[in-house]
Amino acid sequence: MYYTGTEAHEHLLVVDVEDPSSDQEITQQPLRKFRIRDLRKESDAGDPISNGISVEISKGVIVGIIGPRLISFYGTELGTVADNIRYGPQLRGQKLSDEEVYKLLKLADLDSSFYSKTG
């Protein structure tokens, strides 16, 4: 199944919430997870971009995806790899220095040249 950008975005917003059976006493909050199942996308020319990507992300986990092209969300460019690395910590009120970003690139086994690349 292939989706347009808008359709894919709508599918990305689907969040499954684990629901314990009603006869059990609830002692804690249900686990919240973000799930993508079998995501497939083709370019306008028909070339595969993604072929069956499935991922499950638990509440509180921050995930980044790095690719070779410009990435936009509703037409707004999302910036450089360094900008995107800084994004998660910014959500928690932290500001990463350039040195910290370079360390994280190295930790992800990415060359320092990725710092200024778009995406």
Image (tube, rainbow, N blue to C red):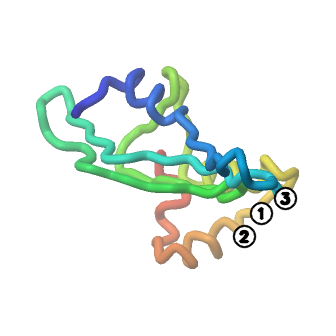
Q: Is residue 57 left or right of residue 3?
A: right
Q: Nearer the viewer, mark 1 or mark 3?
A: 3
Give the amino acid type for the residue marked by disc 3 in the picture.
Answer: Thr
Residue at image coords 47%, 65%: 113
Query: Dot 2: few (<14), some (14–19), or many (≥20) neighbours within 10 Å?
Result: few
| Residue with the mark numbered 3 | 27
Q: Earlier in the sequence, mark 2 or mark 3?
A: 3
Q: Identify which residue, 79 or 50, lies in the foreground.
A: 50
Query: Dot 1: few (<14), some (14–19), or many (≥20) neighbours within 10 Å?
Result: few
77 versus 79 height, above or below = above
Name the spot of residue 103 as percent of width and height, x first.
64, 75
Q: Residue furthest front?
A: 23
Q: Are marks 1 and 2 in contact (CB under 8 Å)?
A: yes
Q: Nearer the viewer, mark 2 or mark 3?
A: 3
Q: Identify which residue, 75 or 82, lies in the foreground.
A: 75
Q: Quadrant of the N terminus?
A: top left
74 versus 52 height, above or below = above
Name the spot of residue 117 as percent of width and height, x first.
47, 52
Q: Is residue 88 left or right of residue 91?
A: left
Name the spot of residue 78 as percent of width and height, x first.
56, 37
SS for tag 3? loop
Name the spot of residue 40 as percent of width and height, x first.
27, 41
118 versus 64 height, above or below = above
| Residue with the mark numbered 1 | 97
Give the amino acid type for the residue marked by disc 1 in the picture.
Answer: Ser
Q: Which mark is residue 100?
A: 2
Q: Earlier in the sequence, mark 1 or mark 3?
A: 3
- What is the CA distance from the residue labelled 1 to the residue labelled 2? 5 Å
Q: Residue 99 lies in what quarter of the image?
A: bottom right
Give the amino acid type for the residue marked by disc 2 in the picture.
Answer: Glu
